[in-house]
Amino acid sequence: MRPENYWWDEEIESKVVKKKKAYKKWIATQDSEERKEYTRISREIKRSVEGNEKPEDKREDSTNLQLTSRKNWQKYYKQLLKEDRAEFQKQNNHDINDGHARSVELTTCDKVQRAIKTSKSGKASGPGAISIELRKAAPSILLNFLQNYLVTVFKGRQTLPSDFKKEIISNIFERGSKHICANCRSITVLSFLGRMYVKILKERIEVEFTDLE
């Protein structure tokens, strides 16, 4: 049971278990009838949840729509983004041995092109408002420019632009009271160039750690 979510009860919990089993069966058999059964249970769960919701928590009830104050959001994120919280400490307890430090191959046009091509289309552009589709259609001269620019950044000749590090935080409401910040799922959106830089950097780090293992 999940007491923090008043709409969750034993009936819904039982249906969720059936849904998981139906999903596994559908994936294993790839049968159209199993897919229909999975879809039927999913819709049934949705109707049950909507039936248990309070009127003030339903999305379509605009008369009860009240915005959460900026002060509450600031307080919520100040606590959520603390680096000394237990969840953060568990993810950052790796020891780094400087003795393994060595030169890393600088990025190439092929890596820049791969980072652009493997980026998912239809995503939010983020800061800068430059869409991924526009970058994918850009001429080769842009790849050369980006490659040369990233090399200067990796060599330390230039600092990383602030726009690369700028993120837009957005909240997606899930379930429960709209007045509780924790009932929203928070996402951050980097600019396209920022996402591309992170993708190339992540690939470089993964290659280095794989070689050291």
Image (tube, grey):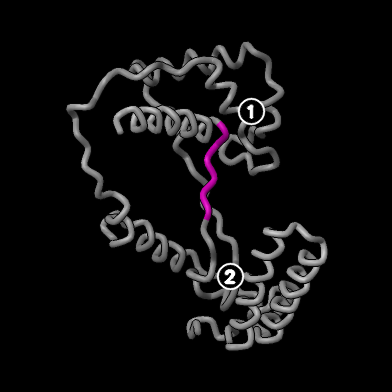
Residue highlighted by disc 1: 117
- Image coordinates of residue 148 in percent, x first then y, are 48, 13
Q: Mark 2 packing: few (<14 Cα in 10 Å), some, or many (20+)?
A: few
Q: Nearer the viewer, residue 39 or 118?
A: 39
Q: Mark 1 packing: few (<14 Cα in 10 Å), some, or many (20+)?
A: some
- Going by the numbered disc 1, the residue's amino acid type is Lys
Q: Could you say whether the residue bearing mark 2 is in a helix, strand or loop?
A: loop
Q: Which mark is residue 32?
A: none
Mark toward the start of the polypeptide (1 vs 2): 2
Residue highlighted by disc 2: 67
Residue 199 in view (yes/no): yes
**In this rendering, the label closer to the viewer, 1 or 2:** 1
- Going by the numbered disc 2, the residue's amino acid type is Leu
Indicate left or right for 154 with 113 as reference. Answer: left
Indicate left or right for 44 with 91 as reference. Answer: right
Indicate left or right for 92 with 145 as reference. Answer: left
Residue 53 position (above or below residue 19)? below
Q: Residue at x 60, y 76 (%)?
A: 17
Q: Residue at x 66, y 72 (%)?
A: 19
- Image coordinates of residue 68 in percent, x first then y, are 53, 70
Q: Quadrant of residue 8?
A: bottom right
Q: Main secondary structure of the magenta part?
A: strand
Residue 47 position (above or below residue 79)? below
- Image coordinates of residue 126 in percent, x first then y, are 58, 41
Question: Magenta segment range?
Answer: 187-192
